[in-house]
Image (spheres, rainbow, N blue to C red):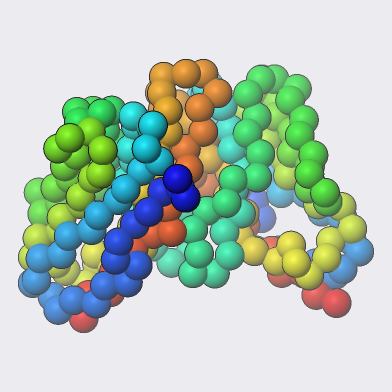
Amino acid sequence: DTGVSQNPRHKITKRGQNVTFRCDPISEHNRLYWYRQTLGQGPEFLTYFQNEAQLEKSRLLSDRFSAERPKGSFSTLEIQRTEQGDSAMYLCASSLAPQGNTEAFFGQGTRLTVV
Amino acid sequence: ELKVEQNPLFLSMQEGKNYTIYCNYSTTSDRLYWYRQDPGKSLESLFVLLSNGAVKQEGRLMASLDTKARLSTLHITAAVHDLSATYFCAVVLAGKSTFGDGTTLTVKP
């Protein structure tokens, strides 16, 4: 297992189009997180799953955003009707919870540019 | 709502000098991480600090945690150019990480 994998690495889309990103976590990890990072800022929490259940969603996650983890393995993050403000790096992380010292490992991210 | 503040946000150092980055947070937490991020790259975990008084060291970097003061520090000793990057602290509560805005470190010869 080579770690958390995200695809695509880069995505350029026109405003108003829909985009979908994929995250493959470390295989034995039951928790999966999505974060968004804009230039000059730290990552901001969007949502997380424990197995296939989506346990929390940030207020940042508007109705245009939806995330799924249908079989408790990979996850997808879809953005509908993209806006220029959606341009950011979208980071996925996974961890093994609820064990105490569990660490979240981050993927390489998907950089979205909305033109 | 948990808030995490780092300072300074930008730090320019000369090689060989020492400096400290500070991370303050607003509520008790489960643990605290320090990450390094190079431009255009993802986050690399440097340290995890679990309890009051915890100190971790790796090479020229040393991290410490004071849970009573809700403060963590990342100390850089005898900086070298390879340490140039952005450093984030992240506080974990109920499994979710809240990040500071990062400290962009530039080490000059």
Picture coordinates of residue B60, whole percent (x, y): 83, 51
* Residue A61 shows up from this direction: no
Foreground residue, B90 or B26?
A: B90
User: Looking at the image, is B59 positioned above or below residue A52?
Assistant: below
In this picture, residue A23 sits left or right of residue B48 = left
For the C terminus of chain B, the quadrant is bottom right
Q: Position of residue A41 (x, y in %)?
A: 46, 58
| Labels in figure, total | 0
Name the quadrant of the N terminus of chain B.
Answer: top left
**How far across and how far down the image is residue A112, in percent?**
29, 69
B31 with respect to A84 (left or right): right
Please tell me in which quadrant of the rendered image residue A51 appears: top left
> Residue at 70% across / 20% down in the picture?
B52
In the shown orientation, is residue A64 left or right of residue A104? left
| Residue at 36%, 43% in the rendered image | A25
Residue at 9%, 49% (x, y): give it. A63
Q: Position of residue A47 (x, y in %)?
A: 27, 40
Q: Quadrant of residue A48?
A: top left
Name which residue lies at 42% across and 28% down. Answer: A96
Quadrant in the rendering for residue A8: bottom left
Q: Of residues A95 and A66, which is closer to you in this image?
A: A95
